[in-house]
Image (spheres, helix red, strand yellow):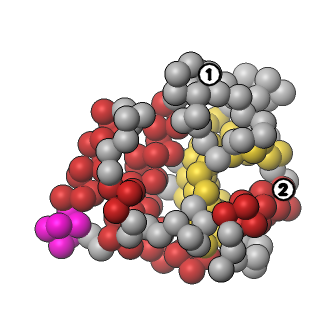
Amino acid sequence: MDGKHEFYSKAEDALIAHGYRYFDGDRDIKGKGRQHANKPDYIAAKGNAVIIGEIKSPAESPKSGSWRQIQNSDTEEFKKVRMEVANREKAGLVSPEVGGHEIIICGQIADYVRKIGVNFDLPQSLSQNLEIQMGYTFPSSESKNVERALKNCRKIVNEKIDTGNGSTTFIFS
């Protein structure tokens, strides 16, 4: 199993191989304000599309209870997603394997998009007339669960990136 650092490198390599400019969340994206650490794992850009992205490595299971715990940095929208998914899981309406991904897709990544200009700024080298999309990179073995979660969240997949290195990225809106 890949460590977090190795898996993040695979995600970066795959996006670059597909023509994206890659901005690392730790290296390249400067946080601001008291919630400065609450920013995406990456921003990727190609053409007029800017992808706000999250990476979950094989060590980060969608069944983890921590994904369902409300955090101090959560917006009200994100809290609602966590609670709604947890309630649907308890009622047997969605499996934790799918529900965890829904929390990331409908909660965490959507929250990052809302926080552009608040917790972090887009890189200055990007043009101003941009189409903001979302990206989710995860172990390829989770593809079916993520596809189901995207469908449940009513997201449209614009691109699937799978270079065969064990990571898959869905870019969606």
Q: Tell me the magenta residue range.
A: 88-93
- Image quadrant where one finds the N terminus: bottom right
Asked if residue 154 shows in the view, the reply is no
CA distance for labels 2 and 1: 27 Å
Side (left or right) of 70 relative to 109: left
Side (left or right) of 2 relative to 157: right
Element under label 1?
A: loop
Q: Position of residue 24 (x, y in %)?
A: 75, 44
Side (left or right) of 162 relative to 53: right
Q: Give the class, few, some or many, for how many residues have Cα within 10 Å of label 2's Cα (few <14, many ≥20).
A: some
Going 50% across and 55% down the picture, which residue do you hit?
A: 156
Q: Position of residue 105 (x, y in %)?
A: 46, 53
Q: Amino acid at mark 2?
A: Ile
Q: Give the class, few, some or many, for how many residues have Cα within 10 Å of label 1's Cα (few <14, many ≥20).
A: some
Q: For mark 1, what is the residue?
A: 32
Q: For mark 2, what is the residue?
A: 16
Point out the tag, 2 or 1, that comes first from the N-terminus. Answer: 2
Q: Is residue 164 above or below residue 45?
A: below
Q: Is residue 91 magenta?
A: yes
Going 62% across and 22% down the picture, which residue do you hit?
A: 32
Locate residue 30: give its quadrant.
top right
Q: Amino acid at mark 1?
A: Lys
Locate residue 138: give its quadrant.
bottom right
